[in-house]
Amino acid sequence: MSAERKLDGVAESPVTLTPSGSWKDLATADATSDCPNKIKVTVFGSGSFGTALATVVAGNGYQVCILTRREQVVSEINDRHQNPAHLASTQLPSNITATTDLKEALAGTSFIIHCIPVQSSYEFLSERAADIDPTV
């Protein structure tokens, strides 16, 4: 399926949408051998959404660090490149790491992707706001 997008009346190049392809395809393509892009992205949350977005970002060559609450998830992602609680059958790219330490997750990061459920976002962010660089 192909779609043409227009911005202020000017047509951009066509965008190809592939319903048969998925982010899972990116997980098998290991873009990490020499990780062409040294920009670090931090993902807040290791649920299905956070893990899926981390996989897409990592598949595009970025270093990704997932901030999670659970040590078991940290061990599984860092050692086996799998998230045991979410998307367990998916092999994660090796340029995804995980931690429970906010300062470690944010060290050297250029972008943050917030994947905490909305009902928990206010509490999550208010407890961590002082540690988040406002320029990120």
Image (tube, rainbow, N blue to C red):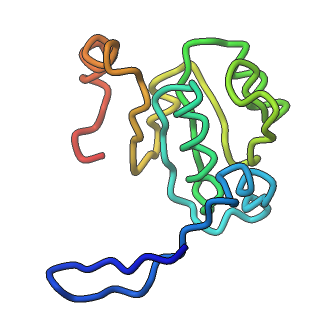
Left or right, 24 with reference to 41: right
Q: Residue at x 46, y 29 (%)?
A: 44
Tag count:
0
At a point 81% along the width and 41% down the height, the residue shown is 91
Quadrant occupied by the N terminus: bottom right
54 to the left or right of 103: right
- Residue lying at the far left in this picture: please name it: 8
Residue 126 in which image quadrant? top left
Measured along the vertical axis of the image, is residue 130 above or below residue 61? above
Residue 46 image offset from top left, x and y in percent: 57, 26
Judge from the rendering whether residue 4 lies leftward or rightward of residue 92; answer left or right. Answer: left
Horizontal side, residue 88 vs residue 61: left or right? right
Q: Nearer the viewer, residue 51 or 77?
A: 51
Give the residue at x 44% y 45%: 109
Q: Which residue is at a point 34% across and 86% down the rendered structure image? A: 12
From the top left corner, tell me how far across and down residue 117 is, in percent.
Answer: 39, 21
